[in-house]
């Protein structure tokens, strides 16, 4: 009896094991990037212009826990809109992940009839902030709203002492890349999602158990979800490796 072992790894594009993995049959199935904005490089005028551009169409403000139902509704209606692979996936918001506090903050845009049409959710750790995700309701895309909420979040967090801002996304996501670039982020790391399919002669327990108990022993450690980050992701884009950006 056999089965197809399907494993996924996320590595930096300059990882020293990259060529060895590709030669061993791993295939690149997705690319992603991380980007940084340093407080010293921010231009207040640029942020203000992005916020002002949408001031007549939406009201942008920091979200509070009373907004949780609106956050969950916007998240649910856009759940399938995130391009890319496992490295940039967006898990659905839960009551817990939509709960805001000093280390988890969110900024949103409201339409004149009181609908939340955009939000960006940011994890803050001391003087560093990492965007968890940003989303705009479909009918409101391409109007500057995404850039507006991101600019508002950077401006507010700057005034609270944040010095380093990180974000990231899928290489397939032109909208995300353009939005972050317009706010001032610069790409400083690229990630590859590698996948290996192989026929493994096997008779025994289901694949998860087999991966856990068997393949790990030959150096193919497998995360419960089938993901094996080769290197520490730092601020890169793994599904919450240390708890990161997009
Ligand atoms: C990515 C997303 C948040 C962008 O929001 P948006 O409100 O549509 O973006 P904006 O209108 O503010 O555009 C900002 C800039 O990006 C550009 N842009 C927006 N969408 C684009 C696209 N699909 N392709 C190329 N450029 C795009 C705009 O032209 C604008 O550039 P400019 O400032 O030079 O005029 C939105 O498309 C979205 O919600 N996508 C689904 C969820 C997602 O992928 N989120 C990102 C990963 S967490």
Image: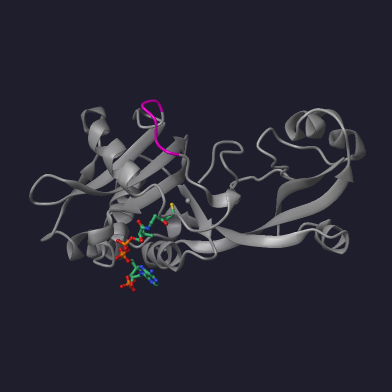
Question: Which residue is at the front of the view, 201 or 240?
Answer: 201
Instruction: Give the quarter the ligand 1 occupies.
Output: bottom left
Q: From this viewpoint, which residue is outermost toward the left?
A: 113
Quadrant of the image containing the N terminus: top right
x then y, percent, for residue 179: 38, 64
**Magenta-colored segment: predominant secondary structure:** loop
Which range is magenta? Answer: 92-96
Magenta includes 127? Answer: no
Q: Is residue 14 visible?
A: no
Q: Is residue 61 visible?
A: yes
Q: From this viewpoint, which residue is outermost toward the front?
A: 1
x then y, percent, for residue 16: 83, 57
* Residue shown at 80% from the left, 28% from the top: 205
* Residue shown at 55% from the left, 65% from the top: 171
Q: Splitting the image into 4 quarters, where does residue 51 fall? A: bottom left
* Residue shown at 28% from the left, 67% from the top: 142
């Amino acid at each position: 009896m056999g089965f197809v072992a399907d494993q996924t790894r996320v590595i930096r594009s300059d990882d020293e094991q990259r060529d060895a993995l590709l030669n061993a049959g791993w295939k690149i199935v997705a690319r992603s990037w991380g980007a940084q904005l340093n407080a010293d490089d921010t231009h207040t005028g640029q942020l203000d212009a992005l916020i002002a551009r949408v001031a007549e169409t939406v009201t942008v403000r920091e979200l509070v826990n009373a907004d949780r139902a609106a956050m969950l509704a916007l998240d649910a209606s856009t759940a399938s809109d995130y391009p890319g692979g496992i490295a940039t996936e967006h898990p659905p918001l839960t009551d817990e992940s939509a709960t805001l506090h000093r280390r988890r903050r969110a900024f949103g845009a409201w339409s004149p009839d009181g609908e939340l049409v955009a939000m960006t959710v940011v994890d803050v750790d001391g003087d560093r902030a990492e965007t968890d995700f940003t989303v705009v309701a479909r009918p409101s895309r391409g109007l500057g709203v995404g850039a507006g909420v991101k600019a508002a979040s950077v401006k507010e967090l700057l005034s609270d002492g944040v010095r380093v801002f990180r974000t990231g996304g899928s290489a397939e996501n032109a909208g995300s890349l353009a939005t972050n670039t317009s706010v001032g982020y610069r790409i400083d790391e690229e990630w590859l999602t590698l996948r290996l399919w192989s026929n493994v002669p096997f008779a025994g327990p289901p694949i998860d158990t087999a991966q856990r108990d068997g393949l790990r022993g030959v150096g193919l450690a497998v995360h419960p979800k089938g993901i094996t980050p080769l290197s520490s992701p730092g601020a890169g884009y793994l599904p919450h490796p240390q708890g990161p950006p997009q």
